[in-house]
Image (cartoon, rainbow, N blue to C red):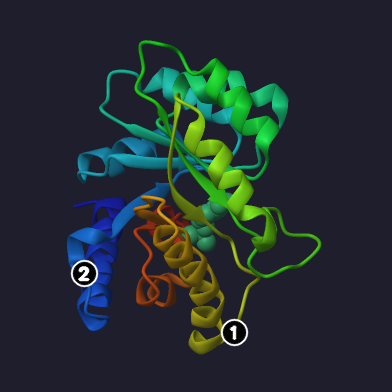
Amino acid sequence: MNNIQHAIQTIQKQIRDDAIRYHREPSSVSLLAVSKKQPIEKIQEAICAGQVAFGENYLQEALGKIAALSNEQIEWHFIGPIQGNKTKKIAEYFAWAHTISDIKIAKRLNDQRPAHLPPLNICIQVNSSSEKTKSGIEPDNILSLAEYCTILPRLTLRGLMTIPAPKNTFDEQRAEFHKLRLIYDQLNQAGFKLDTLSMGMSNDREAAIAEGATFVRIGTAIFGERGK
Ligand SMILES: *Cc1c(COP(=O)(O)O)cnc(C)c1O
């Protein structure tokens, strides 16, 4: 077994153990392998280990990988910032986009989603840490964006995503994810049918699972340090 296969098995076991520790169904947490700045060979090793969902941040880099791996059964997730000039390719080549934070981008993705593909799965990226430098929509503005996304026929609003400011302790990490969890619960109580919380990375995976993450986005712990 190679390093990447081993790392994936280790993380899958951690995810399972975390889920059980927090009284969750292990199958309710999925591993999204974040392959940005990693070579195609490493993605192939991860595929051999049974990994299906891969996350990419940089569109040009991602399109090259998608073309090179077009014979594989991969579910591609876009997890980087989305500018208007990127929406067409994202709509054409990805199954998911996790980083929707404004109406204009949602509308473009909807209009550009090819008719032969199922609706694009999306998450609204929330700025739960309320830091000026962080991307994502402010919590006060989520409801109107969520309502707007729900009426777009070529998008399926699946849930919420966040990248919290780095925190040192487990309790601080957990408090950040708890904020997103509360918003998620409020939206579902208001009648939305969300099933996805995209939160947790290599360093805060357990805290995210404790708060209900359904996708943990793991890069370094699978593939090692990224290239430049
Ligand atoms: C890079 C990245 C990750 C993975 O981070 P690691 O610390 O390498 O696990 C997850 N989510 C997003 C949005 C990223 O940009």
Mark count: 2
Reading the image, the residue beneath label 1 is 168
Q: Does the image show residue 67?
A: yes
Q: Position of residue 100 (x, y in %)?
A: 59, 42
Label 1 is placed on what type of residue? Asn
Secondary structure type for disc 1:
loop
Whether tag 1 and tag 2 are in contact, CB under 8 A, the answer is no
Q: Position of residue 71 (x, y in %)?
A: 28, 18
Q: Residue at x 46, y 62 (%)?
A: 184
Q: Position of residue 129 (x, y in %)?
A: 67, 70
Q: Quadrant of residue 9?
A: bottom left
Q: Earlier in the sequence, mark 1 or mark 2?
A: 2
Secondary structure type for disc 2:
helix
Tell me the crowding category of disc 2: few under 14, some 14 to 19, or many 20 or more residues within 10 angstroms, Cα based.
some
Say if 153 sits above or below 163 in the image: above
Label 2 is placed on what type of residue? Arg
Judging depth in this view, the residue of 164 and 51 nearest the camera is 164
Say if 91 sits above or below 41 in the image: above
Mark 1 and mark 2: Cα distance apart in space: 23 Å
Tell me the crowding category of disc 1: few under 14, some 14 to 19, or many 20 or more residues within 10 angstroms, Cα based.
few
Reading the image, the residue beneath label 2 is 16
Judging depth in this view, the residue of 138 and 51 nearest the camera is 138
The residue at the far front in this view is 190
Q: Quadrant of the C terminus?
A: top right
Q: Residue at x 46, y 44 (%)?
A: 35
Q: In the drawing, what numbered circle is on residue 200?
A: none
Q: Position of residue 119 (x, y in %)?
A: 39, 26
Q: Residue at x 29, y 44 (%)?
A: 46
Q: Quadrant of residue 68?
A: top left
Q: Is residue 53 left or right of residue 106?
A: left
